[in-house]
């Protein structure tokens, strides 16, 4: 993959003016080049997307929407936002898109503001089973000003749906509490979501249906996961996870009346001026996602996740729900070593240059800062060109690090091998010298 002379020039420019900031940027660039990124919610955006995000569109106020702005000088901003909206609609096959949310949590906040009154009830997955904090955490706005009721995963080990969505439980919770809004879509769920089943339950209990596809948006956009349309009333997502765009959020719907409510809830409801440099980068990323190469990438993301999960199972790890059908997996560490915690595993792996996050497994007895699991994802490693063979190598590296329990010699040996592997797969968008440096 091509190195990036523009990133080199940017680094040089910043260094001339601000060596402290430049040093930090340089070290982070090298960190990304020289470590294996397995955090399931992260990716490496293309050079075009990153540079689009670093443009003069950051200078402009464009409060409002195309054709109806509160500031002059928005001619090209209107064009950019229309381009992003049109591509988003095409990508997800729906009628309306709002590309202004600053993040996934901001997109969800706008949906709540648009559809609920303070104190209203909504239903979502138990957060400790893989839900997102913006789906009703007590200290989040969603949990503080609204009333979340949660449905659990299937907890019966002998059931075929063990650790998968328990649709009977969803229905039971919804019929009992009659939520105004039913949410599906998660942060740590490795299986396919059946949006049609959720639609039936939403209709039965009289709820609107909201899919938060923050994690799986890239898979959905390329047909590698079933679409939430036409089943859902509203769909929110991030743009920086599997979708591989800039950091940001997106609200999608087929319902014209709701779309107007969402637009008002984003601006002026919860945000001021849009980040138009990010909207430009979103347009560029959506353009990339519409190309055939993106579908091939998403297929490889799934194949790589399967390869990593399979290799870990062969090494004696348990993968929750027995495997993965998307880009991520939850590794239950206790089957390999009863004493092993997610916190220790995350720390030891980072020392070896393998970056991931500790994560609770369903009904985890350990607290969230400790946990019994790791969440691993394939999107970022797939972007840099890893295939199934490399993922198997990564699995054995993970096992060696965890067996060594922080032993410095073995950790250093794996660290060297990680560097060598990464050097074979240079990141696009990195300054030319970054991959050469050690
Ligand atoms: C990541 C995520 C979000 C939030 O995204 P931010 O951009 O971090 O605000 C929302 N919902 C789900 C399900 C997520 O996984």
Image: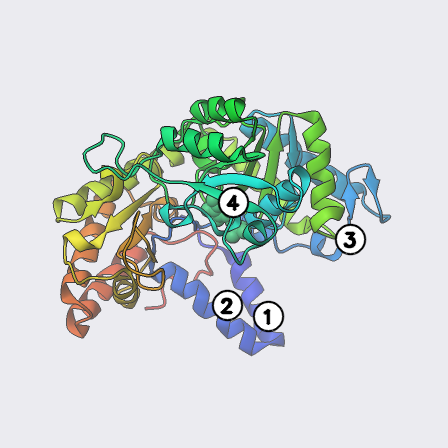
State the residue at coordinates (69%, 44%). Answer: 266
Report if residue 46 is visible in the image: no
- First in residue order: circle 2 vs circle 4: 2
| 311 sits left or right of 74 in the view | left
Report if residue 167 is visible in the image: yes
How many discs mark residues in the rendered view?
4
Above or below, 24 against 66 in this view is below
Q: Is residue 271 or residue 298 the one in the foreground?
A: 271
State the residue at coordinates (71%, 35%). Answer: 261
**Where's the C terminus, which quadrant?**
bottom left
Gap between marks 2 and 4 measured at Cα: 40 Å
Is disc 2 in contact with disc 4, using a CB cutoff of under 8 Å?
no
Gap between marks 4 and 1 measured at Cα: 46 Å
What residue does disc 1 label?
14
Residue 331: x %, y % from top left: 25, 49
Circle 2 Cα neighbour tier, 10 Å, few/some/many (<14 / 14–19 / ≥20): some
Q: Nearer the viewer, mark 2 or mark 3?
A: 3
- First in residue order: circle 2 vs circle 3: 2
Image disc number at residue 25: 2
Residue 17: x %, y % from top left: 63, 75
What residue does disc 4 label?
148
What residue does disc 3 label?
61
Gap between marks 1 and 3 measured at Cα: 25 Å
Above or below, 397 against 348 in this view is above
- What SS does tag 2 mark? helix
């Amino acid at each position: 993959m091509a190195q990036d002379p523009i990133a080199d020039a940017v680094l040089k420019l910043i260094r001339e003016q601000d060596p402290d900031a430049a040093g930090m940027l340089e070290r982070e660039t090298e960190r990304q080049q020289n470590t294996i990124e397995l955090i399931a919610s992260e990716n490496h955006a293309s050079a075009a997307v990153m540079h689009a995000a670093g443009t003069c569109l950051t200078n402009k106020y464009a409060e409002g929407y195309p054709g109806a702005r509160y500031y002059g000088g928005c001619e090209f901003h209107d064009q950019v936002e229309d381009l992003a909206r049109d591509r988003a609609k095409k990508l997800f096959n729906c009628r309306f898109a709002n590309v202004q949310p600053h993040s996934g949590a901001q997109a969800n906040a706008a949906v709540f503001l648009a559809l609920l009154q303070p104190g209203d009830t909504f239903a979502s997955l138990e957060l400790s089973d893989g839900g997102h904090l913006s789906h009703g955490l007590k200290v989040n706005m969603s949990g503080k000003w609204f009333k979340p009721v949660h449905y659990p995963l299937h907890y019966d080990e002998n059931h075929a749906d063990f650790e998968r969505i328990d649709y009977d439980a969803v229905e039971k919770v919804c019929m009992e509490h009659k939520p105004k809004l039913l949410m599906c879509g998660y942060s740590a769920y490795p299986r396919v979501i059946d949006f049609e089943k959720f639609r039936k339950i939403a209709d039965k209990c009289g709820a609107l249906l909201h899919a938060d596809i923050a994690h799986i948006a890239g898979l959905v956009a390329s047909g590698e996961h079933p679409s939430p349309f036409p089943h859902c009333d509203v769909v929110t997502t991030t743009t920086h996870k599997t979708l591989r765009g800039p950091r940001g959020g997106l609200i999608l719907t087929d319902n014209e009346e709701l779309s107007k409510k969402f637009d008002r809830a984003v601006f002026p409801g919860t945000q001021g001026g849009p980040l138009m440099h990010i909207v430009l980068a979103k347009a560029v990323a959506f353009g990339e996602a519409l190309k055939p190469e993106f579908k091939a990438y998403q297929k490889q993301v799934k194949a790589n996740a399967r390869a990593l999960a399979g290799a870990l199972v062969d090494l004696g790890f348990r993968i929750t729900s027995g495997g993965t059908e998307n880009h991520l997996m939850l590794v239950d560490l206790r089957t390999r070593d009863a004493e092993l915690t997610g916190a220790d595993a995350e720390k030891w792996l980072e020392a070896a240059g393998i970056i991931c996050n500790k994560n609770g497994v369903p009904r985890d007895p350990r607290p969230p800062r400790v946990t019994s699991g790791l969440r691993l994802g394939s999107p970022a490693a797939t972007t840099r060109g890893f295939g199934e063979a490399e993922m198997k190598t990564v699995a054995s590296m993970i096992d060696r690090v965890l067996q060594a329990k922080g032993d410095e010699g073995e950790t250093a040996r794996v660290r060297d091998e990680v560097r060598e592997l990464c050097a074979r797969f240079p990141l696009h968008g990195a300054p030319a010298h970054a991959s050469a440096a050690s």
